[in-house]
Image: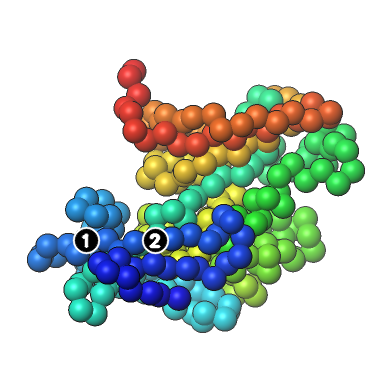
Amino acid sequence: RLHATGGYKTVLTGFQTRWQRRQYWSKRAPPPGDHRGCVWRGARETRARETSSAAPNAFRCMSNSSRGAGAMSADKSSGGEQGAEHGEVTTFPERRVLVYIATSVDGYIATQEDGLGWLDTRHAKDDEGEDFGYAALHERVDTYIVGRRTFDVVRALCAGQFAQASKYRECYVLSRSPQPPHEGVQFFQGHIPDLIADIRSRAGGDIYCDGGAAVIKEFLVHDLVDEFIITVIPIMLGDGIRLFQGGSGAKGVQLVSTRSFKSGVVQLHYERKRSQPIPL
């Protein structure tokens, strides 16, 4: 619902949780010129990505969801909607990107063969009914993003099913190649910052990135992650796929909270701190 009040616009998303009911204000209109690929926030221009006719496949989606194939267009890669009267670009930067993931003590999220069996051991279990904050996370988010490799692993473990497709309003699987349709899933082959800009051009909840490691690295390279909720399982795998693969540059984070459980599981919640550069 959009209401005009003076020089501001207030957008109520319609969600009833305290995380998802937010207030937003329209941003200052950009000056004349070519601003394709830009997200405008006040007088500050943030370059998401130069998008032009020479850059094919900025958005390429295949989906059999209710939005339909190709519903996301390159027109939205600017991260906002053009105001009819003032040429405004409105975004919803408060739709935060979260990484919520489990890792071994020595920093692995899977074995070299993509094995996840260690997550179903006594090391990863606590009191009956403990969900390690997953229900609270689900309250916050309505958009889910995962890599195609993790998507395939989960489907293999669940007889071809992918429950996340029905849990969230939007479910994206990142892939480098065309994939066969899957109910409730939108396959995306474009530039990740463009996808996040497109999602943030619409009101809604937060955005859950579920990996795998290569996807998380890409999010870090483009500094797209706002929060990290990392659950450390008391087991050492010795080898496997590392959570953080390096090569994404130094980044500051601030501790929000820690939780410990009877099983020895420890959960760390960090928030991205962008205000100060990291001295190296």
Can residue 104 be seen from the camera position used here? no
Quadrant in which the C terminus is drawn:
top left
Would you say 125 lies left or right of 73 here? right
The residue most toward the left is 32
Q: Position of residue 37 (x, y in %)?
A: 26, 61
Q: Which residue is mark 1?
A: 28
Instruction: Give coordinates of residue 220: x percent, y percent.
Output: 44, 41
Amino acid at dot 2:
Tyr
Q: Which residue is mark 2?
A: 24
Q: Is residue 72 above or below residue 279?
A: below
Q: Residue 44, position in %: x, y?
A: 22, 50
Which sits in the foreground, 190 or 31?
A: 31
Badge 2 marks a residue whose secondary structure is loop
Seen from the viewer's position, the closer of residues 267 and 171 is 267
Q: Is residue 79 above or below residue 238?
A: below
Mark 1: which amino acid? Answer: Arg
